[in-house]
Amino acid sequence: MTLLRKPSDLRLAVVLLAAGEGSRMGSIPKALLQKDGKSLVERFCTSIKSFDPVQFIVITGFHALPIEQELNRLAKLMDLSITIIHNPNASAGQASSVRLALESLDGAFDVVAMCLSDQPQIGEDELITLLNQFIDREPHQDVLMPMVGGQRGNPALFSKKSVEEMLIAPGMVCRTFMDQHPARIKIFNSDNDAYILDVDTDADIQNLGVTRA
């Protein structure tokens, strides 16, 4: 297994976006889809627990009740601190959840990983790789973005400096920041499809070995 070259003073915050409606699949909570007998959100929590994040925020919106019930179960089961924040404006789109997450960070972090709840193949190894790439970035680079075959991937990592700049600008979110500051992005070209695979359609369920709860 790849070793995590993580300085002891690197404080990792994790944001998991789980507010979507899952409209293309008939309006379902994609975070609760099952893979290998566990919900996608449980698999994600298992992956990040070993990193001991200084803050773990989950943004809910549509399907908040069942997702929050699962998160509360996992927090007790894993002895994991989870900050659950409901986005009452989830219908406004993912950007509203991202902005809410940024505003909810407590500032005591060095890097934040912005993660999606419907990426079933993102695990510990993928996160280790991203953190290693972030650690090895150039001084002017404040964002790490994985890219596979020319396609943007997730999770993306953002320095505390970049988050502070986004918060100064009303309504600024990660994607807009990246579009405005391409020179400050470190592109991590990878052949690992996990960074670009997510569950959007019934065909994805079959292709990725995922089942409905």
Image (cartoon, rainbow, N blue to C red):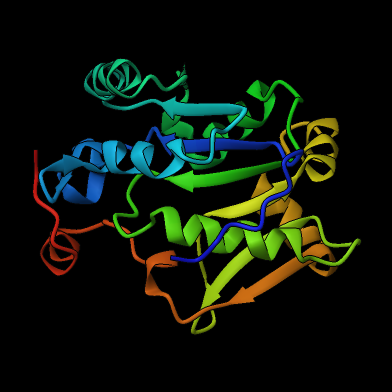
- What residue lies at 21% left-to-right and 21% top-to-bottom? 66
Q: Position of residue 186 (x, y in %)?
A: 74, 68
Total numbered labels: 0
Where residue 76 sits, quadrant-wise, is top left
Q: Is residue 18 left or right of residue 52?
A: left
Give the vertical position of 202 relative to 21 (above or below): below
Where residue 144 sits, quadrant-wise, is bottom right
Which image quarter is the N terminus in?
Answer: bottom left
Q: Position of residue 41 (x, y in %)?
A: 30, 37
- What residue lies at 50% left-to-right and 66% top-to-bottom? 2
Q: Is residue 157 left or right of residue 32?
A: right
Frontmost residue, 173 versus 124: 124
Give the vertical position of 71 relative to 24 (above or below): above
Q: Position of residue 104 (x, y in %)?
A: 64, 21
Frontmost residue, 199 versus 13: 13
Direction right: furthest residue: 139
- What residue lies at 56% left-to-right and 40% top-to-bottom? 95
Q: Is residue 128 left or right of residue 63?
A: right
Q: Is residue 208 left or right of residue 193?
A: left
Give the vertical position of 156 relative to 80 (above or below): below
Give the vertical position of 208 relative to 70 (above or below): below
Frontmost residue, 141 versus 176: 141
Which image quarter is the C terminus in?
Answer: top left
Q: Position of residue 69 (x, y in %)?
A: 25, 16
- What residue lies at 66% left-to-right and 58% top-to-bottom? 5
